[in-house]
Amino acid sequence: MARNGKLALEALERLAPGTPLRQGLERIIQQGKGAIIVLGDVAAVKAISSGGFRLAQPVLFTPPKVSELAKMDGGIILDSEADHIIAANVHFVPSNDIPTEETGSRHRTAQRIAIQASVPVVAVSEGRRTASVYIEDSKVELRSPTIVAAKVNQDLQTLDRLRRRLDEAENGLTSLEVSELVTYRAVVTLLQRAELVRRIGLGIEQEAISLGDEGRLAYIQLDDMVRGVEFLRDVTLRDYLLTKRKASLMKATESLSTLEETDLDDPVKIARAVGFEELDAPVTPRGYRLLSRVARLPDSVREELIKHFKQLPRMLAATVAEFEVVEGIGSARATHLQHYFERVRSLAQEWTPQVL
C-alpha cells in the first residue's frame, strides 16, 4: 500500500473495469502499443516534462482519443480526475537518483515520476501487453477482473478465519482479566491478530476497488469482518500502556502498523514496538476495553470510572453503592454497570484463556 492510502484508492477506483480510463488502456493494449499516462497536471509534473504539446483547452477524455494519442512516442498527461486530456507526446525527465527496481525504461520512468511528483502514473507495457499503476512507492498490476475476483474471494476466506481467531483472543483475554491472570503475552496475541486483520483488510479493499461495481459484495463482506478492529486495538492499548497519554497511544499504534510483515510473527518484537515489558510479566488492565461495551456510557463517565477505580478488578467487584459515588453515575446506571460486570464474569467462565 502506498504511503498515501487515499490517493491509492482513488486512483484504483478510476482504473476499475468499465471505467473510461480502463477502457482506454484496454484499447492501447489491443493495438499493441505502450504508454505512460500521468494522472495530475501538477507543478512537479510540469517541472520534469519536456517537449510534446499542451492543448490550448483541456479536451474531454474518451477511450478512443487516449488510444490514438498513445500511438505517439511521448507520454500523456490527464487531470487528476482523469476527465480531461491536458498534454500529449510529452518526454518525462525524472531524477535518475530515485531508486527503482524496474528494468524496462518505460516502467522505470513511470515509477520515478510517481515518487518524485506524488501523482498516480500508469505504464502500459508494449511487450507484455499489461498495464501497471504506480502510486508513490507502490505498484499495482491491473489484472483481469476474473483473476482479481478469485483472489479477493480467497483473501476473504483467510480474513474470516483470522477474524474468528481475533474474537477468540479477545474472549480469552477477558477470561484472564476476570481471573486476574493477565500477562503481556495474552495482550500481544490480541494485538497481533488485530493487526493482521487490519492489514489483510486493507489489501482486500484495494483489490475490491479495482473491480469496480463487481466488487460491491466483497465490500459488504469486508466491512463486516473488519468493523471495530482498530477500535479494539486502541482500547486494548489504553488498558495496558504504561501511561494513558494520547501521545503514547499514537506512538504505539504507529509502531505496530509499521512493523515488517515478518516481525508480526514474533511476540517479542510486537511487545517491544508498543512498549510492553517482559511477555510473561503479570499486568492489570485499566478497564477501557470492557467499559467500551457498556451501552450509552458517555466517554466522560468512562474516564471518571477509570480515574476512580484505577483498575478493572476493582470495578468487577464493585457494589451499586460504590458505583454511585462516581461523578455522572446515578442509581440506574450503577445498577446497570453491576449487572453488566456480573454477566462478564459469568461469560468469562465459558471461554478458554488464550495464553499463546
Image: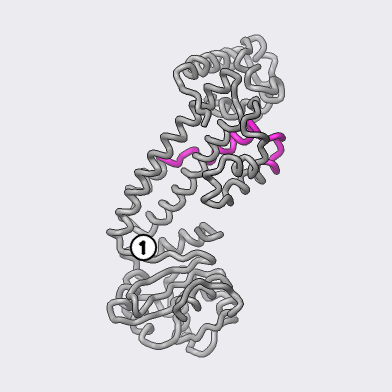
In the image, is residue 19 above or below residue 197? below
Q: Secondary structure at mark 1?
A: loop
Across and down, in percent, residue 323 comes to 65, 15
Quadrant of the rendered structure where residue 239 is? top right
Instruction: Indicate whether 129 appears above or below 285.
Output: below
Q: Let me know if residue 233 is in the magenta part.
A: yes
Up the image or down, 73 lies above or below 19; here it is below
List the residue tagged with mark 1: 16
- 273 or 10, which lies in front? 273
**Main SS category, magenta section:** helix
x and y, in percent, of residue 157 in the image: 35, 43
Residue 88 falls left or right of residue 18: right
Q: Which residues are magenta?
A: 225-248
**Neighbour tally class for label 1: few under 14, some 14-19, many 20 plus, Cα within 10 Å:** many
Report x, y in % for residue 173. Answer: 53, 27
Residue 232 appears anywhere in the view: no
Mark 1 belongs to which amino acid?
Ala
Expressed as whole percent of the image width and height from the top left, the position of residue 112 reads 54, 74
Judged left or right of residue 137, residue 271 is right
The residue drawn where x is 67% and y is 22% is 311
Image point 49% across, 19% down: which residue? Answer: 348
